[in-house]
Structures are given as structure tokens and as C-alpha cells.
Amino acid sequence: MSQELDNRIRVFRAEHRMSQSDLADAIGVTRKTISTIEVGKFVPSTVIALKIARHFGVPVEQIFSLPDAAE
């Protein structure tokens, strides 16, 4: 089973003029956590994903999605 997850965190941060540190502070994680999620090195927990979505006021599916399967 693939552990890949696409995300649009960088897009949402840019739209809200937020740094990685700003978002990290807002949801209670480190800047490194936001960075590794953005670049796809780390799949966030459900709690972190929901906190990010809630912070931006959107459904989690607008930020996170499964990549298209090429099977």
C-alpha cells in the first residue's frame, strides 16, 4: 500500500501570506513538520491534517488528496 499523499499546503500558505513557521505555530507543530509534509517526505496524522484544514477553513480534501494510481 502506498504511503503517498499529495497536498496543497504551500498554495494555501501563499494565499494567506503565511510562512511555514506561522502555520506550525498556529496548529502546534514544528516548522520542520510542515516542511516535511509539504515536500511529501512525511504523511501527516489525521489530527494534523484536520488541524491544517480547520486553520484554513476548508475541508481536508481541498488540501490533501491521494495521487492518481497508475496501476
Image (cartoon, helix red, strand yellow):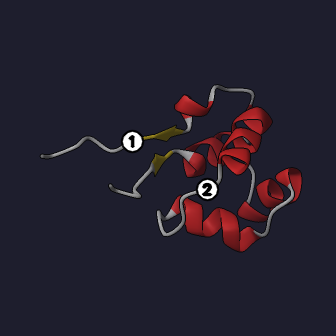
Q: Estimate the x, y position of residue 60 in percent, counting from the top left.
A: 61, 33
The residue at the point 67 percent across, 62 percent down is 34
Q: Disc 1 residue type?
A: Leu
Residue 12 bears which disc, if any?
none
Please, is residue 32 above or below residue 18 in the view? below
Residue at screen point 83% across, 51% down: 27
* Rendering quarter of residue 21: bottom right
Picture quadrant where residue 36 is located: bottom right
- At x 65%, y 39%, the residue is 15
Measured along the vertical axis of the image, is residue 58 above or below residue 23?
above
Q: Quadrant of residue 28?
A: bottom right
Q: Is residue 52 above or below residue 1?
A: above
Point out residue 69 in the picture as x, y percentages from the top left corner. 22, 43
Classify 10 Å Cα crowding around label 2: few (below 14), some (14-19), many (20 and above): some
Where is residue 14? Give x, y as percent: 63, 47
- Whether 65 is drawn above or below 34: the answer is above
